[in-house]
Amino acid sequence: MTDLPGHMGRYHVQMELPHSATLARYYTFDWSLIGNLGVDLLIVPLSHIFGNELASKSIILSIPVLTAVGLLWVAHEVHGEIPPTAFFALPFAFNFPFAFGFVNFALSMGLGLLAFALWLRLARLGRLKLRAALFVPLSIVIWVTHTFGWGTLGVMAFSAELVRQWDMRRGFFRAGWTAGLHCLSLAPPILLMLLWRSGEHVTGQTADWFNWTLKWRWVEMALRDRWYYFDVGALVVVALLLVIAVFHRRLTYSRNLLASAIFLSLVYILLPRIVFGSNYADMRLVPYVMAVATLAVRFRQGASRRLATLLAVMGLSFFGARTIGSTISFALFDKEYDRNLAALDHLPHDARLVSFVGTTCVKPWAMSRLEHLPGIALVRRNAFSNDQWSMPGAQLLQATYPDGVGFRRDPSQQVVSRRCRFEQWRTMNEALAQFPRRAFDYVWLINPPPYDPALTRGLQPIWRNGSSVLYRVADRTPPGASPKEGQ
C-alpha cells in the first residue's frame, strides 16, 4: 500500500519519541484533536501488545472486512434480505484509495457504512429518539477517525431520511426540513471542525475545482490495482448490471439507496481535488458511490428464482475473481517490498538516512507503491526518514531536522529522470548533487532512474540488489567540490 509505510513511520515516532534522543533530533509530535486520527489512536494500545508492524497489519486487515459487512448490512436493511446483486459491490472494499494507503479515510468509510446501516435499522424500528442519542457520540467517533467518513455518513443519512419522510406523504420541502432536523444528531463535529481549522498554525489550500478530465479518470480508477483490462473490465461488469437494472422488467432500484448514490455523486462533482492541503479528496469517494449504486439494484415482485440464482452465481464469481486477482497482486508487490527492505539488514540503528525513490512523471497503471517505503527504516532501525508528511494542522508530526533542510520531508524522497511539469520532484542527479553530506551518513536508492555515476563519488556501496543500492557516506565532499571543501 503506497502510503502505509510512511504512516507506520509516523506511528513509530509517536510511540517512541518520548524515549528516543535520536528521534527528538529529527521530529516533533504534538497531539491535538483533528479529524484524521483513526489508526493513529488504535495503534497506541495495540502496538504495546503486538508491536508496530503486526498492529498496523491487524488494523488494516480489518478495514475491507468492516467495509464489506457495512455494505451487506445496508443491503439487508434496505431490501429486507441480501440480494445476490450485492455481491457485485463487495470488490469495492479493495478499492484504489485503500490500496493507495489512505488508511484513516478507509477506516472511517467502513465505520460510516456500519453506522448508516444502524441509522436505517433504527428508523425501520421506529427508534428515532434512541437513534438521535446514539449518533451524537457515533458521529464524533467517525469524525475523529477521518472527516470524510463523517461527511459521507451525513449525506447518506440525510438522503435516506428524505426518502422516508417523502414516503410518509410529506411535501418535498417539508420532507427536506424534517430530514435536516433528524440529522442534527450528526452535527456536533461541525464545532470540532471549526475549532480544528481555526488553529494558529493550520495550513493547506483548497484548490483544483471541477477538473473534469481528472474526475473522469478517477471513475476509471475506482478498482485500479495492477492490470488495466482486469480492473477496468470489472467496472464494465458493474456498469452493465446498473444499465440492465434500468431496462430489465424483473429488476429495479431501491429509491433509498439510489437517492444516496445520486447525492454522493453530486458531492463528488462539487468536491475539489485538494481540500485543506489533502490531495485526491474527490477521487476517494468514487468507489463508494459505485458500491452504493450497485447495492440499490433489487428484484421486482414476482422475479423468478432462476434469475436470482443466475445473478448469485455471477456475483459470487465476480467477487471471487476480483479477490483472487487482488491477492496475487498484493503478493507481487510484497516480493518487491521484501527485495528492497533487505537493505535495512545492513543499516545500523539510529542512522542518519536519506532515501531517494525512483518515480515517473506519468504514473503507470500498476504503481510501484514504493514511494514511502523509507518509512520502514524508521520502524525497524529508528533511522531518520525524509518521506514523512509535515503539514501543520493536518499532521501531528513535523520533521524539524535542521541540518537536513530541503531533504527532511515528503516529497524529497521522490526522484525522476527529468523534471516533471507541476511537480516538485528533483531529478536523480539533482538529488545526489544537492543533498547535504554532512547531514546524512547513509543514502538509500530504491529503484532509481538512471543517474551520473560520478555523483556517487565518496559514497561506498554496502548493499545492492538490481538498481537499488544502499550507500555509506565515506567522503562528505560534495560532488564537484575540492576535497578541502568537504573537510
Image (tube, rainbow, N blue to C red):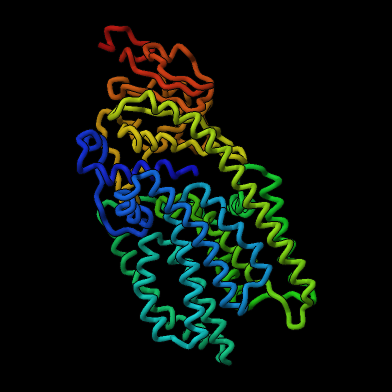
Which residue is found at the position 36% from the left and 66% from the top?
141
**Compared to 242, does 334 lie above or below?**
above
Q: Is residue 70 left or right of residue 32?
A: right
Q: Quadrant of residue 243?
A: bottom right
Which residue is found at the position 42% from the left and 41% from the top?
5
Q: Position of residue 320 (x, y in %)?
A: 66, 55
Residue 235 visible within the image = yes
**Compared to 171, does 458 lie above or below?**
above
**Compared to 393, does 110 lie above or below?**
below
Question: Closest to the observer: 47 or 184?
Answer: 47
Q: Is residue 284 left or right of residue 307?
A: left
Which residue is found at the position 29% from the left and 29% from the top?
349
Q: Is residue 92 left or right of residue 118?
A: right
Q: Quadrant of the C terminus?
A: top left
Q: Is residue 174 left or right of residue 129?
A: right
Which residue is found at the position 59% from the left and 88% from the top?
167
**Compared to 210, does 121 lie above or below?**
below
Q: Position of residue 201 (x, y in %)?
A: 27, 51
Question: Closest to the observer: 424 or 340?
Answer: 340
- Marks counted in the figure total 0
Residue 213 visible within the image = no
Q: Position of residue 305 (x, y in %)?
A: 77, 75
Q: Residue furthest front?
A: 49
Q: Residue furthest top?
A: 483
Q: Position of residue 57 (x, y in %)?
A: 43, 48
